[in-house]
Amino acid sequence: MSTEGSPIAELRGGFDATEGRFALLVSRFHSDVTDRLLEGARACLLEHGADDTHIEVVRVAGAWELPQLAAHGVRLGRHEAIIALGCVIRGETPHFEYVCSAASNGLGAVAREAAMPVLFGVLTTDNHAQALARAGQGKDNKGYECAMAALEMIQAFRKMEIR
């Protein structure tokens, strides 16, 4: 797995999550992978000062359901960021393309309309080994990386509001 170009090493420790409330939306499909993404995202938020009671985890069946739940979370307005985590592994049918497209396009549409960061942490891999490699420890965990991106976006949103 390539981590080339990832800003994680440089950004780690540079954000304050003490006041934030976060929604981690996690698909149950391929839970051996998504549970690791969740652990990575939660570890990142806690490492940056988030209160564990301010991290709400909501599980859905699969990646297909993530955009609808993210849109609902945005409407509720209870969180400073929404982080969607899932895993879709290519199979023998076109179902992979449909689910990946729906998750990507759906979360993108929600993010463009939201007044808060909405992050895409859905793995789209060719096989299970690739998915596990992206759900490893530390910088090799895309859940951690997605939570870091959420913290960076929160800071960017705040910076724009001050100006």
Image: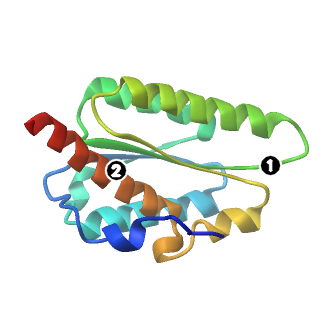
Q: Quadrant of residue 145?
A: bottom left
Circle 2 residue: 150
The answer to whether residue 28 is seen in the rendering is yes
| Position of 140 relative to 102 (above/below) | below
Assign the N terminus to one quadrant of the image: bottom right
Q: Quadrant of residue 126?
A: bottom right
| Residue toward you, 158 or 90 | 158
Number of other residues with Cα within 10 Å of mark 1, as a class: few under 14, some 14 to 19, many 20 or more? some
Q: Position of residue 5 (x, y in %)?
A: 51, 64
Task: Write the residue at 31% across / 23% down.
Answer: 75
**Callout 1: SS:** loop
Marks 1 & 2, CB-CB < 8 Å contact: no
Badge number at residue 90 = 1
Number of other residues with Cα within 10 Å of mark 2, as a class: few under 14, some 14 to 19, many 20 or more? many
Q: Position of residue 34 (x, y in %)?
A: 56, 57
* Amino acid at the residue labelled 2: Ala
Say left or right for 160 vs 9. Answer: left
**Callout 2: SS:** helix
| Residue toward you, 61 or 15 | 15
Task: Write the residue at 19% across / 65% down.
Answer: 49
* Amino acid at the residue labelled 1: Arg
Residue found farthest to the right: 92
| Position of 103 relative to 132 (above/below) | above
Q: Quadrant of residue 48?
A: bottom left
The answer to whether residue 21 is seen in the rendering is no
